[in-house]
Image (cartoon, rainbow, N blue to C red):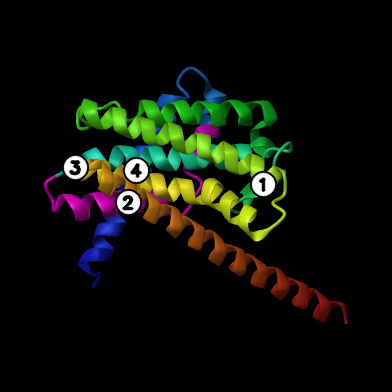
Amino acid sequence: MSKPKEQTVALWHDGIERGLAELAARAGEGSEKLTEAANYVLLGGGKRLRALVTLAVSKDLSKGRVGEGASMRPAVSIEALHAASLVHDDLPSLDNDDFRRGKPSCHKAFGEATAVLLGDLLIGAAIASLVAPEVSLAQQARLSSVLAETWRALCVGQQLDIESPRDETQRSRMIELKTGALFGAAAACGAICGGVTDDVVEGLNDWGVRLGVLFQKLDDIDDGERARSEEHTSELQSH
């Protein structure tokens, strides 16, 4: 029998997937190819960790006073912004990755021009999705500001990555901007929906950034161990 917390996370996952499907349909309206690409990118798997952070923070801070509909909107928007960053990161002019989550990256599946447009499209769609009856006008303004600032941070982080950080301090700053900023935004958006003061929102943003940095470092360790394992297997097979 599943536990209550596991049931909650499963329900959140379902809500996130539905929200992303709706966002993809709205974002690509008028272009069959962009709609297909949006579905390909947004519904292509993923742990949805950032969205879950938003929902969990909002639920904890609001003590049940805020409906999940209000926090689900920014949770989905955070995932859309994350997807946009991955689409752009994979482009040949940036990280030049041909695969993402075990399948061809967006520019390989739909062409480089469509990938550029889709990334741009998802940025706008992420912010536009915040306009909903369940999200107050004051919250819409604060959430939109968080998402806009987060995209700025992601761009700076990507530029630092291109410039190849030369020491640990520079690399840490790059990770804070390129990975930590999205986790920080996820926590901040949850706090805004939870109805707390600006200083609490700022504090949770800082906590989220640190969480994102830890996540990236653990992911790098996992990637390194996987690469060493594959190398060792290849060596064994060659003998």
Q: Are marks 2 and 1 in contact (CB under 8 Å)?
A: no
Q: Which residue is mark 2?
A: 203
Q: Are marks 4 and 3 in contact (CB under 8 Å)?
A: no
First in sequence: mark 4 vs mark 1: 4
Q: Amino acid at mark 4?
A: Ala
First in sequence: mark 1 vs mark 3: 1
Q: Which residue is mark 3?
A: 195
Q: Amino acid at mark 3?
A: Gly
Q: Which residue is mark 4?
A: 75
First in sequence: mark 2 vs mark 3: 3
Residue 59 within the segment the image draws in magenta: yes
Dot 1, crowdedness within 10 Å: few (<14), some or many (≥20)? Answer: some
Residue 236 within the segment the image draws in magenta: no
Q: Main secondary structure of the magenta part?
A: helix
Label 3 sits on a secondary structure element that is loop
Which of discs 2 and 1 lies nearer the camera? The answer is 2
